[in-house]
């Protein structure tokens, strides 16, 4: 039995060649992204690359957010996550995140964040 026999097209695995994707700018200086997954329910998986000194402005997590640090550091007033480590935040958590030396990390969101200044979330189209 092959995978083609086991799963109809809508249930088959989706492979993403993240290495071949270009980094896309975000609305925040020094922050680039690759959207690996996004759906109409608000869930997303995003690979971020932050330049040294970059800041993610004040925002609130509407639901669980999980981040695995591939390289570098990301910190807020509650602590720091560094290379090879993981942090998760519950819905309702508010913070400003910043990096000292730059970072590459994978974040998984169950719902889009809400930015204090009304800035759109990374998966929302411009003008939304």
Image (cartoon, rainbow, N blue to C red):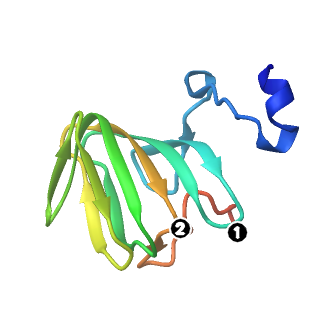
Residue that carries the numbered disc 1 in the rendered image = 127
Q: Nearer the viewer, residue 119 or 34?
A: 34
Q: Which mark is first along the chain, 2 or 1?
A: 2
1 and 2 marks in contact (CB < 8 Å): no
- Quadrant where the N terminus sits is top right
Find residue 90 and report its horizontal and vertical position in percent: 34, 71
- At 14% from the left and 66% from the top, the residue drawn is 77
How far is disc 1 from disc 2 in space, using C-alphas?
Answer: 16 Å
Residue that carries the numbered disc 2 in the rendered image = 112
Q: Quadrant of residue 61?
A: bottom left
- At 52% from the left and 64% from the top, the residue drawn is 110
Circle nearer the viewer, 1 or 2: 2
- Relative height, residue 7 to residue 17 (above, below): below
- At 51% from the left and 57% from the top, the residue drawn is 27
Would residue 37 be found to the left or right of residue 33 on screen?
Answer: right
Q: Nearer the viewer, residue 74 or 1?
A: 1
Would residue 94 be found to the left or right of residue 100 on screen?
Answer: right
Q: Residue furthest front?
A: 1
- At 26% from the left and 53% from the top, the residue drawn is 87
Crowding at mark 1 (Cα within 10 Å: few <14, some 14-19, many 20+): few
Disc 2 secondary structure class: loop
Q: Quadrant of residue 2?
A: top right
Find residue 92 and report its horizontal and vertical position in percent: 36, 79
Q: Quadrant of residue 35?
A: top right
Q: Which mark is residue 59?
A: none
Find residue 117 and report its horizontal and vertical position in percent: 44, 78
Would residue 44 be found to the left or right of residue 83 on screen?
Answer: right
- Relative height, residue 2 to residue 14 (above, below): above
Q: Nearer the viewer, residue 110 or 72?
A: 110
Disc 1 secondary structure class: loop
């Amino acid at each position: 039995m092959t995978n083609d026999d086991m799963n109809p097209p809508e249930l088959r695995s989706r492979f993403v060649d993240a290495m071949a994707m270009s980094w896309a700018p975000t609305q925040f200086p020094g922050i680039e992204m690759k959207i690996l997954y996004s759906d109409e329910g608000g869930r997303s998986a995003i690979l971020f690359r932050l330049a040294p000194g970059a800041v993610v402005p004040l925002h609130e997590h509407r639901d669980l957010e999980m981040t695995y640090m591939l390289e570098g550091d990301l910190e807020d007033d509650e602590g720091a996550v560094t290379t090879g480590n993981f942090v998760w935040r519950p819905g309702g958590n508010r913070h400003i995140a910043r990096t000292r030396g730059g970072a590459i990390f994978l974040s998984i969101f169950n719902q889009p964040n809400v930015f204090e200044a009304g800035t759109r979330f990374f998966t929302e189209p411009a003008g939304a």
